[in-house]
Amino acid sequence: MSNDEIPPKLFISYSWTSPDHEAWVLRLATELRDSGIDVILDKWNLKKGQDSHAFMEQMVANPEINKVLLVCDKEYVTKANNRSGGVGAETQIITPEIYRKQDQDKFVAVVTECDEAGKPYVPAFYGSRIFIDFSDPETYSESFEELLRWVFDQPLHKKPPIGRKPAFLSEEGRVAALATSSLFRRAENTIQNGRDNATPLVVEYFEKLSAELEKLRITQNTEDEFDDLVIRSIESFLPYRNETIKIFLLLARSGNTDETIQIVRKFLESLIPYLDRPRNITEWRDDDFDNFRFIIHELYLYAVACFIKHEKFDSAAALMTDGYYLPDNFQGYGSAMTIFRVFKPYLRSLQYRNDRLELRRASLHADLLMQRAGESGIKFRDLMQADLVLFLRDHLSHPDVQFHWWPETLLYAGRQTRPFEIFARSQSTKYFNKMKCLLGIDSKAELVPIINKINANPQSYLPQGGFSIYIEHLLGYERIATEA
């Protein structure tokens, strides 16, 4: 028999207060034995003619006894405190044992009775140690489970393993800390508690975050490769990205007002200047702002994903249909307004990194998005779903333009064994009628041209990885709007 199969030994110390109390102790002992514990009880183990004091001393001090249970009612505590009777004799043995044990995990009090004020009866020598409360018959099952966990050293709450030190803390001051956390906590608290000042605090948080991003601007005055600086900057933003996603999720849960979505839209709009050079920079390379481009693309994608996840389809659609105002110095745009496609620029530095390190990855951009999704509170599948919606919306709304939204994350969509959730649910006509505002269509037939276009030349429209992507499968097209 292995050590894991040897049942733990447990001795029960109690007072013969009344026949009912003795019956309760006997029942507890029986249930413990039924649960794989070798219970030592005087009624079973103390034979006639044996010295009861010697028996108790052996049970309490014996190193083979793993656990000692002190069943505490009023009578037990009175005898223990007054050192009277058999309980008093046990107390004289137990007290030094409790204080001698460094781990203090061999003894536990099981409280079966409380005084008139609701205070549990525990002996004075037990002090302020944690006890297991059996005083309420209604919670007997929960208390019994707690007792079993104590005996088997299997606590309900286990200390998690220590993770890796966050990368942004290991850069020896080479990356900036953004001063947003206190505002984030205030905004989070006000939204969760439904307070009236939630809106101005969220606005203040978004404004602060937008301004603080300037601290992440890369100035290459080191010997590091530029793509290393881009990756380091992206990694340093991770905790702030997670804060922002939490705010997105809370806003998506809390309501679907025009005010809420306009706050998010204005925040995203405030990030656009980071996508290109500031006015004061006269010499630059096209990839100088790639860290901002990745961060802003990721934030936009998560904003859409959060509102879709909580089925706030009108709000998510507003993030795609409302125009975004461009700063004067923004390159390549003749108009002062643009659409959401502005949030998905090409990152030349990541391709350079892929080539320089000979990584041979289909898309480092997609890899980073997938790797970072685990810490976001949003599943990567939800992120891909949002990417697919953005891709379809751009093609459906602007079929004649040359460049459309590129769905970076769909590189991994070929691994999906079923349609994305909102399309699978759209087999219900009622659900489809609620969801279709995301795509800006009135019927599923309007999807046919884009499906045919993609099928005719998939390499031009979707990322190509190790798995084939079938757009009809991702949409579950055949079953859309087939049920009531």
Image (cartoon, rainbow, N blue to C red):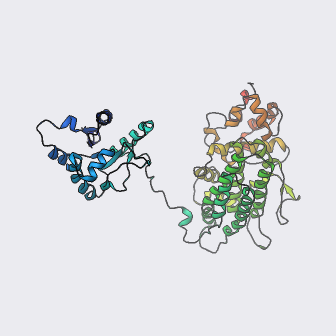
Q: Quadrant of the C terminus?
A: top right
Q: Position of residue 180 (x, y in %)?
A: 66, 64
**In terms of image quadrants, where is residue 41?**
top left
Q: Residue at x 61, y 61 (%)?
A: 231
**In terms of image quadrants, where is residue 439?**
top right
Q: Position of residue 394 (x, y in %)?
A: 80, 45
Spot the residue most to the left: 49
Q: Relative to residue 171, is residue 8 depicted above or below?
A: above
Looking at the image, which is closer to me, 248 or 97? 97
Asked whether residue 352 appears in the rendered view, the answer is: no
Position of 239 with respect to 41 (left or right) is right
Asked whether residue 319 appears in the rendered view, the answer is: yes
Spot the residue most to the front: 116
Q: Quadrant of the N terminus?
A: top left
Position of 374 with respect to 278 (left or right) is left
Looking at the image, which is closer to me, 12 or 442? 12
Spot the residue most to the top: 483
Q: Residue at x 78, y 63 (%)?
A: 273
Looking at the image, which is closer to me, 443 or 348? 443
Instruction: State the count of labels.
Output: 0
Q: Position of residue 337 (x, y in %)?
A: 86, 56
**In terms of image quadrants, where is residue 217?**
bottom right
Q: Position of residue 293 (x, y in %)?
A: 71, 59
Q: Relative to residue 153, is residue 19 depicted above or below?
A: above
